[in-house]
Amino acid sequence: MSDSKNMKFVFVVTYGRSGSTVLQTILQSIPGYHISGENSNCLFGLYKSVSMAKVARFEHGRNDHASSYPWFGADKIDPDRYAEKLTQVFTEEIIQPPVGTRVAGFKEIRFHSVGAEHFEDFLNFIHQYFASCKFVFNTRGWRELVRSGWWKNQRPERVEEIIRDADAMYSEYLEKYPDRGVLLRHEETRSDPMAFKPLFDFLEEPFDVDAIAAVASRRLGHTGQ
C-alpha cells in the first residue's frame, strides 16, 4: 500500500457509456497512476456522514453539555479530523493504491445522481480532503447515448433530461472553479488522440500521441468495442 499522505488524486466525473473506461485506461497508462473503476458512489456516504457530524457539532454542540443532556459529547466532535480519517480509510480500502503510486483516484458514473442540491458541495468535500485533487469531466451527447448499452431501455426524453442536467452541473462547477478540472468530450476523443492533450496539459504530464492512440484503440472487454 502506498503512502497516501504524499499522494495526489484524480477523479473522473462522468456517466455511463461515455467512453470513461477508455479514459480510465489512458490515465492508468501514465507511470505512477492508479485509477480504479466505479465503487457505486460510496464516497457520497462519507460526505453525508461528515455533513451530519458538522450539524451535531455546530448546531447542537456549541456548549459543553452535562452528561444528562441529549447532545452530551457533541462539543467534542471534530468534523475535520473525522473527515481526514474517513478519507484515509477510503483511500486504503476502496482505491487501494499499490506501492509506488504517486497519483490515485477512480472513475464514477454516478456523481450526478446526488442531484444539483449536493453536487457542488460534494465535489468541494472531495477537493478539500483529498490532497491536490483534480477532476476530469467526461461527456457524450445524449442522442448517441440513447443508442448505447442500457440507455436504450429508457425513454429518449428521460435520457436527454439526465444528460442535460449532468452536463449543466459539470459546466457550472468548472465555470466556478476553473482551476480544478478539465472537460473532455467523447465525440472528440474517440476519433482524435490529440483531443487528450488538454488532459495531459492539465495534469502536467508528458503527452505521447502515438502511445495514447495505441491505448485508446484497445478492445474493451465490457463493450466489445
Image (cartoon, helix red, strand yellow):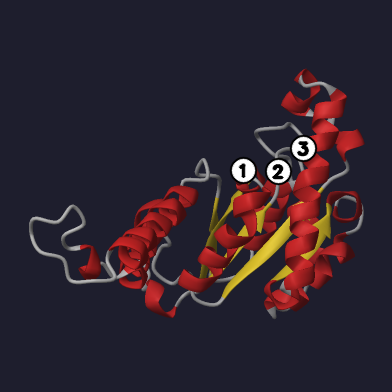
Can residue 147 be seen here? The reply is: no
Q: Nearer the viewer, residue 119 or 200?
A: 119
Q: Are marks 2 and 3 in contact (CB under 8 Å)?
A: yes
Query: Residue under circle 1?
Result: 110
* Residue 173 at x, y percent in the picture: 73, 64
Inspect the image, locate mark 1, and give the three-letter code of the amino acid beneath it: Arg
Type of the residue with mark 2: Tyr
How much space separates mark 2 and mark 3, taking CA atoms?
9 Å
Q: Nearer the viewer, mark 3 or mark 1?
A: 3
Q: Position of residue 159 (x, y in %)?
A: 81, 31
Please tell me whether residue 104 is drawn above or below residue 217 in the rendered image: below
Tell me if 62 is positioned left or right of 113 in this view: left
First reached walking from the N terminus: tag 2 or tag 1: 2
Q: Residue furthest top?
A: 153
Answer left or right for 120 relative to 179: left
Q: Which mark is residue 15?
A: 2
Asked if the residue under mark 1 is in contact with the one under mark 2, i.e. CB atoms within 8 Å, the reply is yes
The answer to which of marks 2 and 3 sits earlier in the sequence is 2
Q: Reading the chain from its start, which is encountered first: label 3 or label 1?
A: 1
Mark carried by residue 162: 3
Q: Count neighbours of disc 2 (C-alpha within 10 A) and say few if under 14, some if 14 to 19, many if 20 or more.
A: many
